[in-house]
Image (cartoon, coloured by chain):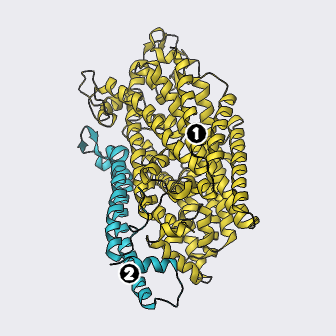
Chain colours: A yellow, B cyan
Amino acid sequence: MSTQLLTYLFVGASFALYIGIAIWSRAGSTKDFYVAGGGVHPVVNGMATAADWMSAASFISMAGIISFMGRDGSVYLLGWTGGYVLLALLLAPYLRKFGRFTVPDFIGERYYSKTARIVAVICLIFVSFTYVAGQMRGVGIVFSRFLEVEVETGVIIGMAVVFMYAVLGGMKGITYTQVAQYCVLIFAYMVPAIFISIMITGNPIPQLGFGSEVADGSGLSVLEKLDGLLSDLGFGNYTEGSKSTIDVFAITAALMFGTAGLPHVLVRFFTVPKVSDARKSAGYALAFIAILYTTAPAVASFARLNLVDTVHNTSYEQAPQWFSNWENTGLVGWQDKNNDGLMQYSAGADNEVTIDRDIMVLANPEIANLPGWVIALVAAGGVAAALSTAAGLLLVISSSVSHDLLKQTLMPTITEKQELLFARIAAAVAVCIAGLFGIYPPAFVAQVVAFAFGLAAASLFPAILLGIFSKRVNKEGAIAGMLLGLVFTFSYIVYFKFVSPELNSAEHWWLGISPEGIGFIGMLLNIGVAFGVSRFYAPPPAEVQNLVDNIRIPSGAAIAQSH
Amino acid sequence: MSEQPYEHQSENPSPHDHNDQKTLSQKNAASYWQANLRLLAKLLAIWFALSFGCGILLVDWLDQFTFFGFKLGFWIAQQGAIYVFVALIFIYAWRIQIIERQYGVDDDAEESSV
């Protein structure tokens, strides 16, 4: 069977599975729709959270980014996993005890203010839409590269599938499809990773192969050989960084605090039965995520090593098969500048080889000479990663519209049935908008996805954290903090990325912090202003202080939710 | 150490009944919170020391040591820290449950997740 046919078969079978699950787990109430009925087992929720969290960027792009950044790539590894410690220790258990449906629910009640709720909804929609646009684009790209359909067709097929299970099943449908998607994506990631590890080092476990000797008799370890090859070609050493320490610190912090403040991740912890389950569930989620996140840096080093080894100074006629396979997609290219018929790869102007970072994962099966079904599996895995994250994001967008904007603010008299209908309509509209972003990507999408984290860190994370750990921060302080954090971070990013991109370099940055890391400063400003402004206004009323006392105590969560 | 009064209190925060129990449970709740904050401080200190300390601030200095074929700082930043993050969450889940039982504020009596 041809690889093409296998890919259709694998992707088609996985879609049939997701739609089957959606029909089986149709939501009957708003509680089903928003929090999957609140009875999800912590391991199941952990797996769903892992799929929710690992997007097209984690699956397709991350190993490639690390591959070209070397040690500086640690910002993503540390940032996107360390945030779960904050989530499990500081936020998830208390939000579960609070026991409502959405993140703006918490902010609105804790800060006894419709304004605070609306500000939270704005932050949430802003963060989630920038993020979802990238996912739909990811679906389209996987389709176009593996199935050779137009990006547009790919996006429309992806939209139709997400539409089925997000609109019908709500959180309940999403939870169980995400479990299936996690299994597909982790299997698809690990199979080629294991084979490429065997190929390079002879060790089947990528995490161990990463530190082993290269199986070419040189006696050098993978990283030693890579350092040597890259410095010969004029690149910096793989195991040394080139970013300033303060910038690495700020970017990692922005990604960590942003991860902990992402609404589509937070809301997953509303679905487990008990407070103690929320903590355990975050642990399982990170364990499932860690399987991919500890494999990615190993794949990154193997792929870079293999690339330099097999491509540099090889004559074009003898280029490895995968090179010519991927050449017509534009992901790799060669231009014979000195007309010697050899492919020179280097950091300087004489470089002749262009390589897209996504190739490091997408071409892995071919680099390791694996059969067609593994290539088909990687395609199904990439689609699973993009769809699971897109669905989670669409759900938080639709529930914040139907629940926070309509039911709690504008139309308090609607019945539960009407609210559920509005939730479905909102989900449908959100799917269409996300699809449009995927088909007509605004030029800025790729650049802003990473900033969703900065904005989440500077706006939502401090408001939730202070709402739990301080009884003194009142609505005035929280609203001022959220607005300042959001506006400051947003302006800094827009200034350096869009207004004056020519100034976007270390000597012009404030304190030497890049736009990627500025969310950390935004967060500190938010916290400072929240405390400062709160001092000038009355403390929160007694019932809010009681609410804070109540959410700090684990007992009573299951009962509280059955109301 | 019965859970009854605390559940009762969180359900029915009416100020006029169970005055004695309320004072007791409030006291317990406050001590529980202090114990929780102490545990959080310890675990977050490890979290910070490892990720920002060893993985970023001290990474160049740590790289002089070798660890199973890796430079130590590099390994912590790209592998080790992630394993410890997972461990920290499970350690917290385990330790805090012991503390909760001690102060009678745990959620064991409620409907099970399994």
Q: Residue furthest top?
A: A317
Whether residue A509 is visible here, answered yes or no, is: no
Q: Residues within 10 Å of mark 1 (few under 14, many from 20)?
A: many
Expressed as whole percent of the image width and height from the top left, the position of residue A492 reads: 63, 55
The CA distance from mark 2 to mark 1 is 46 Å
Expressed as whole percent of the image width and height from the top left, the position of residue A411 reads: 76, 65
Q: Is residue A456 above or below residue A99?
A: above
Whether residue A225 is visible here, answered yes or no, is: yes
Please give the name of the residue rendered at 52% of the width and 91% of the height, measured from the top-left corner.
Answer: B16
Expressed as whole percent of the image width and height from the top left, the position of residue A324 reads: 52, 15
Expressed as whole percent of the image width and height from the top left, the position of residue A455 reads: 59, 56
Chain under disc 1? A
Q: Which mark is residue A387?
A: 1
Does A215 sit left or right of A95 as displayed?
A: left
Does B32 sit left or right of A91 as displayed?
A: left
Please give the name of the residue rendered at 57% of the width and 69% of the height, measured from the top-left corner.
Answer: A563
Q: Is residue B47 above or below residue A430?
A: below
